Amino acid sequence: MKTVETNLNTQRRGLLVRGAGLTLSAAAVAMLAGCSPSRARAGTGDYSDGSRTQDLNILNTALRAEFEAVAAYQLGADSGLLTRAMLPVAVQFQGHHREHAELLSQTIRTLGGEAAEPQAQYRFPVETLDSEQDVLTFAAGLERGAVSAYAGAIPLFANSDLAGAAASILADEAMHWAVLRHSLGLDPVPGAFFS
C-alpha cells in the first residue's frame, strides 16, 4: 500500500505543478476565500499579464483532484468494508471534497474560465481493497497527496488571495489525513514539518 500512497502523492503534486496557469477576478478570489464578492477588496484579482491563465490552470487541476477524492470516498462508502463508526466519517470527508469542488468550479467560472468536469471513471486500486484498513489506507494516501499538491501549488498562484484560500483547503485535507492516520492506529501528526 505504501507504493500506492507514494505514487498518488507524486501524481497529485505533479498535476498541480504542471497545471499552473490562470488568473482570477476579485469576485472569484472572494468566493474561493469564503466571503461574498461584495466584501472583496477592489483590484485583488486584477491581472496585467498571462498569470490569470496560470491561476485558472492551478484551480482546474485542484478541481480535478477534488472530483477524484469525491469518487474515491464513494468507492469506500459503497465497498461495504467500512464499519458503522467509519462510514459517516468517509461520507463527511466526501462532502468536504464536494464543497471544495463546487467552490473551485464557481471561482473558475467567475474568472471567465471553463471548469473541468469529473471523469466518467477513475482508476483506483480496487483489487487491493479487501478490508476497512485497506480503504482507510487508500483514503489517507489520497489526502496526503492532496496536502502535498496544495502545498506545491500555493506559491505558484499569481494572486495571493487565491494562495490563502488554497491554504484553507490544504488545512482541511491535512485534518482528513490526520483523522485517517489516527483511525489506522498511526501517529496522526508524524512530524513537526510535512514532507
Image (cartoon, grey):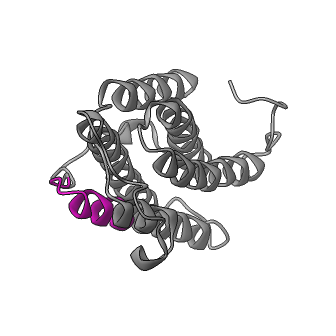
Q: Position of residue 184 (x, y in %)?
A: 72, 46
Relative to 35, 89 lies left or right: right
The mark tally for this picture is 0
Q: Residue at x 30, y 45 (%)?
A: 23
- Magenta-drawn stretch, dominant element (helix, strand or loop): helix
State which region is magenta. Answer: 102-115
Q: Determine the image quadrant of residue 137.
A: top right
Q: Residue at x 25, y 64 (%)?
A: 110
149 in magenta? no
**Viewer-nearest residue: 6 or 98:** 98
Q: Quadrant of the N terminus?
A: top right
Q: Position of residue 89 (x, y in %)?
A: 61, 67
Residue 169 versus residue 13 in the image, above or below? below
Q: Is residue 131 visible?
A: no
Q: Quadrant of the C terminus?
A: top right
**Viewer-nearest residue: 162 or 182:** 162
Relative to 188, 136 lies left or right: left
Q: Is residue 91 visible?
A: yes
Q: Residue at x 56, y 35 (%)?
A: 151
Q: Position of residue 85 (x, y in %)?
A: 67, 71
Q: Position of residue 29 (x, y in %)?
A: 41, 59
Residue 48 versus residue 5 in the image, above or below? below
105 in magenta? yes
**Viewer-nearest residue: 144 or 84:** 144
